[in-house]
Structure formats: C-alpha cells, structure tokens
Image: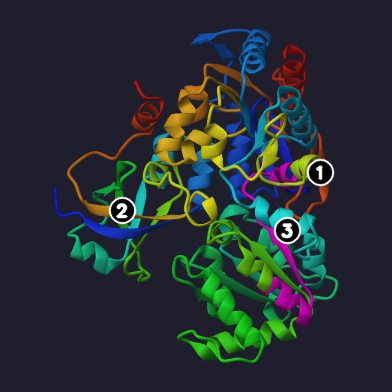
C-alpha cells in the first residue's frame, strides 16, 4: 500500500503516474477492464435488486459462509463480521495460511516492528518463502534493502544484508546473490532446525556446514534483524511451530522482528478484525456452532449459501473443493469479473478502494493507512453494499 | 502422446502473471503468463519435452495442458508452475499435515502432448459443471 503515488486521469484512463510499480500500474489500468455488473438469476438488474436477492439468499440459509474480505476496507471488514454475527455465519479466508503469522504477532508470540523501523535500523533482512520483488515490487527499494535510513546511511552497499530462503531462485534471491539459501520443497523445518543448532554453536546437519555456520554468525551479530514471511513459508509445513521456535531462539540472542508479506492489500486488517472479534485470525464461525480452526472442507459441510467479497476462491482452490463451492448458491461482491463471479447466481459490483472509493486499511506491519478516492465513480464502495445487505437481512 | 512420468510440482507467484491478473483473467496474456511449467533441462530431455511445446500434467484431481519452458538454472526433479487456475486443477483436495490443505506443492504425471493449452473458459466450465 504505497502512500506516495501521484496520478493524473482522463476519465478512467491513466495519463501520468509517479512512484507506481508495474503491479500498481496494472491495478490502475484495470479501472476500465472487465468490470463486474449487477446480476441476479442470470439477468442484469439494478444494484438494489441484486443486493435484495443476495439478502434473501443469506437470510434464508441455515449455514451461510462469508468468504474473502482481504481486499475490503477496515470499515467494510468490521461490518462483514457484524453481518456474520447477525447471520450466525462463518467468515474468513481459508485459502491463505498467512493468518497464522499475524495471529502469532497479535498474541505476542512473534516480535514485530514497522516497515519504517526496518528502513531506519535493519541491517539484516531475511525473506523466507517470500519474493517481494514480484509480490510487492517497492518493498526492497522503499524499506527493506536499498534505502538509506536513520542508522543505515550507507544502504545496501555496506549497511544491509539480504538473505533469501526459498525453494527457487526468485528475482529477490538473485538480488541477494550469495545470501540465497535454497531449501528442498518441504525442507524449511529441517533448515530452521539446522540454523537453530548453528546459532547454539553446534555443527548443523546440512551439506554446506560452513555456509550455515556463517549465516548463524551473521544473525547473531545483527543489530536489528527483520524476517519477512511469504506464502512459501506459511504453506511450508505443519503449524509453523518450527518457525516460532527459531524466532524465539533469535530473540534470545539479538533483536529480530517478523512482518508477514501478505497477498491482499488489507489482509492484515482482516486478520486483526477477526482476531479482535473472535480471538483467531483464521476463519471463525458465529452462532450456535461457533468456533475457529475449520478449514474450507469443514466450512463447506452443510453450507447452503455463500457470500464472496472481493475475492476469487474458485481460481485458487483445489478443483474438487472449487466444484463443491460452485454448487452452493452464491452471491459475489467485487470490482471485476472472475471465475467466482461467473459461477455466482447474484453479482454486485463495487468501486475500487483507493481509486474510486476512500477508506482505511492496515499495512502488513499493522500501520493504518487512510486513503481518498482519486476518480469519480457511480459504483458504491463495498462498505455501502454491506450496509445495504445488513438492512436486507 | 509421450510417456508420462512423475514430477514434483511447486507453485509460485510471478510479477508478470500478477500484472496480467489485474488486467483480467480472461485475456490471452494472463493465460500466457499462467499456463506454464518450468522444467529442468535434464527432466525435459528425459521426457522428450521441447521448450515452448504443450505439456500435459495429470493428478488424481484433474489434468491441464500448459506450455513447457526450460529453465536456465538446474532444478532436477522439480517443476515450477505459477499459482493459478491451471495449477489449482491439480492440487490435492485432502487435508495434509496438521489438517491443512496443501496449496504449494504436489506430485503430477508429466509428458508431452499434441493438444492445445487448456483455456480459462474450459476451467470455468469444469468448475461450474453441467
């Protein structure tokens, strides 16, 4: 979420931009591409009619499920949780495991800091299963590797070290050069165990013992270390207890902080809102069968209505689960057409946050960012759509 | 069709794919950046798969045809595939370690094929069913 972007528009066409990365430019250019239209029962209808149809669907359901919300503003997320409470529904994003990291931070089990702290103080940045050069193209240049900071005046040339732990030589790994540690698929926990042993002065059980011991020495000597966790780490193995143990060991030796690299602009906001409401960053269920910890197969058991907000779960779920989800009566709220909106019986278009609508979100480091709209639009923000839905149910 | 052999597939997200995703998943450009399998040179040779030719991937969950690419960097025994609707057709649906879905890697049978690359429309139809 970059707060320093300048852009000029001619209607929906982008004319000039400053500080916009390639992904950001595509996001801006998508203003005029494949936008969602309001539909119900296969026909185009007015937005109010689509909302009414979605309301009927949800109000008549015994086990409704609310999916997505990572691309919604903070206000819309909190209203989404209120809607879930009113319906006795489950809500969350069961397709990402990054909530485990955020939850560890919110519980105080993982130390954290802000991106501004990283820019000013960090001398060692570890990107674990994380390729910000692809996922967050300005991460390295604004905060974590290239910039000068208060205590890092000599930048990456002398003051900062980049370490990448990944299964493939990603663009970020190429920048890290000798700081790249390639792990075999599923080998993250063993790598963490070997590193923990090396931090304790033991001989690690890895092929290149010298390289691992050198890494342990660098980490021990770090004045301010930051670990950025990507989907490669979150999806690696088990409950990530091995990662929490390694961070705890590092914390005994020096200062290390963890910041998750999240795929959606307000995934952190969602994790935090769910945690505040129900004590878990993962999907939670309200009502008589309330609780947390259910994966998507469990959430789909007996589910008779789905509301998807700002997401495309059918594009990323394993095919059998996607087919099961597609068979459940569904309403989809979003900005653009996608596989999920094409399968939904009701579709409700919304304005793009940060371009057509203002609001607030949490960066991955937990810092709140408020933003205004940049172009005029006749589409309603997702917050307004959810307010209408609350009334409808 | 050539012989199908097992390969470990690991998914990843790349910037070019994410750019095209933002511009619309029904575009040819999105398919060109997503329906890909990066193979180790030796693995490609062993399976008689040529660079830029169609390749079939098959698991117990589903099958797709994507374009084969040959990596400059060696990674024997592992194929890299952008995380996309194409890779999702192959993911296992059973919960793995700790009761969690495995969204990152899976075993697939891989071989050359004389068919066209699976389109996003075909994938959508498969998901929505009859």
- Where A269 sits versus A347, above or below? below
Residue bearing mark 2 = B108
Instruction: Give the x, y percent position of residue B111.
Output: 21, 53
Q: Which mark is residue A104?
A: 3
Please provide the residue range marked out in magenta: A246-271
Label 2 resides on the chain identified as B
Instruction: Give the x, y percent position of residue B46.
Output: 19, 65
Instruction: Give the x, y percent position of residue A219.
Output: 69, 81
Left or right: A392, with B60 as reference point: right
- Which secondary structure lies at badge 2? strand
Pointers 2 and 3 within a single chain? no
Q: Quadrant of residue A30?
A: top right
> The C terminus of chain B is located in which quarter?
top left
Q: Residue at x 25, y 69 (%)?
A: B42
Q: Nearer the viewer, residue B82 or A244?
A: A244
Marks 1, 2: nearer the viewer:
1
- Which secondary structure lies at badge 3? helix
Q: Residue at x 47, y 66 (%)?
A: A186
Give the Cα distance between marks 2 and 3: 34 Å
Left or right: B88, with A112 as reference point: left
Q: Quadrant of residue B115?
A: top left
Give the Cα distance between marks 1 and 2: 41 Å
Q: Nearer the viewer, residue A88 or B32?
A: A88
Residue bearing mark 1 = A276
- Which secondary structure lies at badge 1? helix
Q: Residue at x 47, y 53 (%)?
A: B96
Q: Residues within 10 Å of mark 3 (few under 14, many from 20)?
A: some
Give the Cα distance between marks 1 and 3: 13 Å
């Amino acid at each position: 979420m970059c707060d320093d972007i300048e852009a000029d528009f001619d209607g929906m066409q982008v004319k000039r931009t400053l500080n916009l990365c390639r992904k950001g430019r595509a996001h801006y250019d998508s203003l005029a591409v494949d936008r969602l239209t309001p539909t119900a029962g296969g026909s185009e209808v007015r937005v109010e009619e689509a909302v009414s149809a979605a309301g009927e669907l949800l109000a008549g359901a015994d086990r409704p499920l609310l999916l997505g919300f990572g691309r919604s503003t903070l206000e819309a997320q909190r209203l989404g949780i209120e809607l879930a409470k009113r319906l006795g529904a489950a809500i969350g994003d069961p397709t990402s495991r990054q909530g485990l990291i955020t939850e560890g931070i919110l519980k105080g089990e993982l130390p954290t800091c802000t991106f501004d702290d990283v820019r000013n103080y960090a001398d060692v940045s570890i990107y674990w299963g994380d390729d910000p050069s692809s996922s967050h193209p300005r991460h390295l240049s604004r905060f974590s590797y290239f910039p000068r900071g208060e205590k890092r005046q000599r930048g990456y040339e002398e003051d900062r070290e980049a370490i990448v732990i990944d299964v493939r030589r990603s663009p970020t790994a190429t920048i890290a050069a000798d700081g790249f540690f390639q792990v075999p698929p599923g080998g993250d926990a063993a790598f963490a165990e070997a590193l923990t042993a090396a931090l304790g002065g033991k001989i690690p059980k890895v092929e290149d013992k010298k390289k691992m011991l050198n890494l342990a020495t660098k980490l021990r000597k770090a004045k301010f270390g930051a670990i950025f966790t990507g989907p490669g780490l979150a999806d690696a193995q088990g409950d990530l207890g091995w990662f929490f143990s390694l961070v705890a060991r590092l914390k005994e030796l020096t200062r290390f902080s963890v910041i998750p690299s999240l795929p959606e602009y307000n995934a952190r906001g969602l994790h935090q809102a769910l945690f505040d409401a129900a004590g878990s960053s993962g999907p939670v269920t309200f009502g008589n069968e309330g609780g947390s910890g259910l994966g998507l197969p469990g959430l789909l058991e007996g589910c008779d209505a789905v509301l998807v907000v700002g997401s495309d779960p059918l594009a990323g779920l394993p095919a059998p689960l996607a087919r099961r989800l597609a068979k459940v009566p569904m309403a989809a709220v979003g900005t653009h057409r996608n596989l999920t909106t094409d399968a939904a019986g009701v579709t409700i278009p919304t304005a793009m946050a940060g371009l057509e609508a203002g609001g607030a979100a949490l960066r991955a480091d937990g810092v709140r960012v408020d933003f205004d709209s940049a172009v005029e639009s006749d589409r309603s923000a997702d917050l307004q759509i959810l307010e209408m839905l609350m009334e409808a149910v | 069709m050539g012989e199908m052999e097992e390969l470990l597939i690991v998914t990843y997200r790349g910037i070019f794919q994410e750019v095209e995703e933002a511009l619309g998943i029904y575009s040819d450009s999105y398919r060109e950046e997503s329906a890909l399998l990066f193979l180790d040179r030796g693995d490609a040779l062993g399976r008689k798969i040529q660079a830029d030719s169609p390749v079939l991937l098959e698991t117990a969950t589903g099958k797709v045809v994507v374009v084969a690419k040959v990596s400059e960097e060696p990674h024997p025994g592992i194929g890299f595939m952008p995380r996309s609707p194409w890779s999702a057709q192959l993911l296992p649906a059973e919960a793995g370690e700790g009761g969690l879905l495995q969204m990152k890697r899976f075993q697939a049978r891989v071989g050359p094929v004389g068919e066209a690359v699976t389109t996003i429309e075909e994938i959508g139809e498969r998901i929505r069913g009859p």
